[in-house]
Amino acid sequence: MAVREIAPGVHAVGAVDWNLRLFDALIGTPQGTSYNAYVVKGSEKTALIDTVDPKFEEDLLKNLMRLGLGSLDYIVINHAEQDHSGTLPLLLEMFPAATVIADEKCRDLLLRLLLVPEERIRIVKDGEALDLGGKTLEFMVTPWVHWPETMMTYEREDGILFSCDLFGSHLATSELYADDFMQIRPAAKRYYAEIMMPFRASVRAALERVSALDLQVIAPSHGPLYRNPVLILDAYAEWTSDAVKNLVLIPYVSMHGSTAKMVSFFTDALIERGVEVQPYDLTRADLGEVAMTAVDAATIVFAAPTVLFGPHPAAVHASYLLSILRPKTKFVSVIGSYGWGGKTVQHLKETLSHLDAEMIEPVYVRGYPGGEDLAALAGLADTIVKKHEDVVPRS
Ligand SMILES: Cc1cc2nc3c(=O)[nH]c(=O)nc-3n(C[C@H](O)[C@H](O)[C@H](O)COP(=O)(O)O)c2cc1C
């Protein structure tokens, strides 16, 4: 990514990863990503805010050269994850006078993850400020806005918040700003679902602090920047709120069509009752989209057949992933088909019990669903409608 000016003396110097398709060896990134880093140059001192994934160290170094930076006084590390901190060891070699600025927990992680020499790190506390000469950096320690050590940096004079992973999106684009928010929104929501959703309470607390700032620009560490911050702040307020939609998410898998028949009937039954439904066939679904739907869904119903005495492995993977992403879903249930016996329902119930959601009695049937089985599914749809009446505001 070319060097871009955000305000006088403040530049974006990060890199775009156009081709990344899997992040953390776990989540799909169909639109690539970027690793954003920023230079803030005061009249006295110069700071680099975050670095880039080590795969892109050359891009960062070139950008620093293009800015004509002969020296760096500070390298602020908001987050110790290697996609933001990984180039630090090289930078410390190249800029021997630079001091690393980090909070205490980040210091501990930098020592362990990157073997950074302890004497190069200066610890800052929440609310502490660093004067670069006409540019003041204020540090906001926001634990569990992804990892335990996460921090944000606010540049007071220009009203720029370097929010690190908060408000990020995995989106490779040549645009510096997310001016067309509706175009960016799905990528921002996907990022929230995959990265931030497990920490909804901490994110909400951070959101309150951020909303009180005089904000001109939000500059996250992935994806485009926001120079109209209210749009992303409003979206986050909605996603992190307790409100759910009249929506049922159905992740399902079926080998020979019995569970698929149940899903098809159940989907229609919910639609007929005025409930929005989103089924995903787990053999081909993008789990990022499943997670995005889980951001709003009042109910999740897992649908899986029994394979070797337990749930089909595709359902094991997806249910475990959803249980650790911790959506605000209020109700869960299980449907599916078996041949002779096993522990599918117990297994999925146990996994889904990690969500703070009420379990509605599963409908688990032997073989291909007959009339009574379909009636039981219609009953489940009726129950869901009633449950939703209590938690979904009427429009
Ligand atoms: C590889 C394989 C393993 C199976 N293991 C079990 C099992 O351990 N217990 C059981 O009750 N049924 C088992 N079944 C039978 C299926 O659960 C049953 O046929 C079910 O109706 C399949 O649902 P589906 O058509 O949605 O795939 C197995 C089927 C297959 C293909």
Image: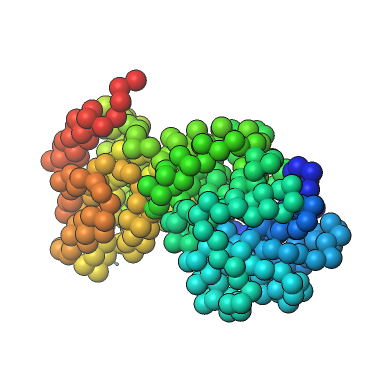
Can residue 21 be seen?
A: yes
**Visible in this render: residue 18?**
no
Q: Quadrant of residue 101?
A: bottom right
Task: Reply above or below: 331 against 2.
Answer: above
Q: Nearer the viewer, residue 371 or 384?
A: 384
Vertical comparison of 99 with 266: above or below: below
Left/right placement of residue 289 relative to residue 222 reads: left
In front of the other: 257 or 91: 91
Quadrant occupied by the N terminus = bottom right
Q: Residue at x 74, y 72 (%)?
A: 97
Quadrant for ligand 1 reads: bottom left
Instruction: Answer left or right for 386 relative to 131.
Output: left
Residue 53 spot, x, y in % from top left:
65, 65
Figure quadrant of the C terminus? top left
Q: Residue at x 24, y 46 (%)?
A: 357
The image quadrant of residue 344 is bottom left
Residue 262: x percent and y percent?
26, 44
